[in-house]
Image (spheres, grey):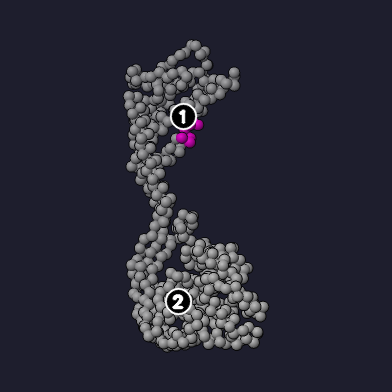
Amino acid sequence: MVQSLSITSALKLASMTIVQTFWIFCENSSLHGLRYIGRNKAIKGNILLRNGELGFTLLLANSAWDQFRSNPTITTIETTSYPVSLIAFPSVTLCNINKIHSVKAEELGRKLLDLGIQSNDTIDLLYSLPRLNDYRAIDERIISIEQLLTSKGYDTERIAFEVAPPCETMMVHCFWLMQPVQCSSLFRRTKIFAGYCCSFNADRFLEPIFTRSLNITPQETIHVTGIGKGEGLSVMMDIGESNYMASNRFSYGIEVFVHRSFDFPDYSDYTAIVQRGKETDVSVLPTIVTASPLLRNIPVAMRGCAFDDEGNVTTSVPYTYSNCMNECELRYTAEVCRCVPLFKQTFELQELLQVPICGFRDLLCLLDLKERFNFSAYGVLHVHFRSTNCLKYRREPFVTWQTLVATFGGILGICFGGSILSIIEAVFLFGVIPFTVYNALRSKSKTHPSPTVNAISYIDYPGHQPLGYFRRKAVMARAIGDSGDTQWRMEKRMHPLETRRWKQHYIDELRIMP
């Protein structure tokens, strides 16, 4: 019974502390209108009004927070006249529609004949090489020939490389900034999804392992200051119609892909076809999108983009969107088919995955995966910038912590007239004052004896202190002029009708048990 009374008295003491702290906060807070809650005649209406204001404030704050969570980034135009002289000249990859050079095929046939491979088998195998690009079905006989070639030291990658049209026969004359240049010094053999091609200003990882130079030197970024045909790359190419043997199109020509030097080209980079007797002009109008460093504070899953040092850095291939998509496809293919496609393979990733290059025996698996993926007459080509200026976009956080504070502060100011000082006041009043009030009530309860329960049913006590009771001047005046219990008494100027009774079961300081 003693323990029950002790708990009851502690709860009553705590309730008195909360009520008194609330009235002190209303009386001294700088928030507009809170002090008027204390008026007896309008207490219910004021409390209802303030609760409505609080609900409206929380509704606006929640709406602002949801907008930030759903749209964490915003892309704006930083400038409409960004000079192209500050942009690296793009890489240009040229791929002959013909995938097998007839002269190279004859040379390979003679080599294989010495190894015991019949000419008919060699021709059938070469005509089947484009199937490694489009994943069409082949005859079982081709798989047997492939296995025989593998036993002789020839794999599919080496055969496709040896019969591909060489860059020397494709490039006749090359000009850079209107100056004649040796084509061999500008173009290098590369391997992309379209087959073995010739690339200008491409990174080293696009080169097949057979032709990579052992001397690794950093590649310089190429910039141009002008626009037009004279301020870029010009190439006269031999389509080589007389050497066509197997192609993936029903036409003659050379495909042009314009892309960034550190990107693995894909179908979106396809630009044009250079055909016989025609002059093809490719004018490039770049669009620059930069990202604010503040985006690093937002999780990658929310912003929907990654910086180059945040992506997959397991290989030496630069991290870009195009390279990431190609790597994801290769990883999935390697997981399902236990190989990587010949014309999408990079040596770095293949070495990491430790799987072979797909051959004819893997075409059935590749064909099944393809359904799941959604992805010598002369011709002249000119590649150059179209304009001296271009658009530059900047991606930045839609809401930073400064704007978030300003937004919530504006909502609080409109609804309550609050500020940072109001928050400090609330922290102080609800963090410090309750202990002061609690100690005062506790010490007061010890100085008064506890009467019997039947002796008192109601006592005359105000529901709260009058307006201005807790003001600093009034408190100091009472402390100087009065003593003892005067801080809990009504002031003499208070009208008797404004005095209310407190029910004994609500707050009764005379019944507090020690």
Which numbered dot is residue 249? 2
Which residue shows up at 41% across the image and 53% down it? 71
Name the one closer to the observer, 120 or 506: 120
Q: Residue at x 43, y 61 (%)?
A: 292
Disc 1: CA contacts within 10 A as few (<14), some (14-19) or many (>=20): some
Q: Label 1 sits on what residue type?
A: Ile
Outermost residue, top side: 455
Percent position of residue 52, x then y: 36, 35
Depth order, front residue of 323/95: 95
Q: Is residue 195 above or below residue 21?
A: below
Q: Nearer the viewer, residue 10 or 342?
A: 342
Tag count:
2
Q: Amino acid at mark 2?
A: Arg
1 and 2 marks in contact (CB < 8 Å): no
Residue at the spot of label 1: 18
Segment colored magenta = 430-436
Q: Position of residue 318 (x, y in %)?
A: 52, 69
For the C terminus, which image quadrant? top right
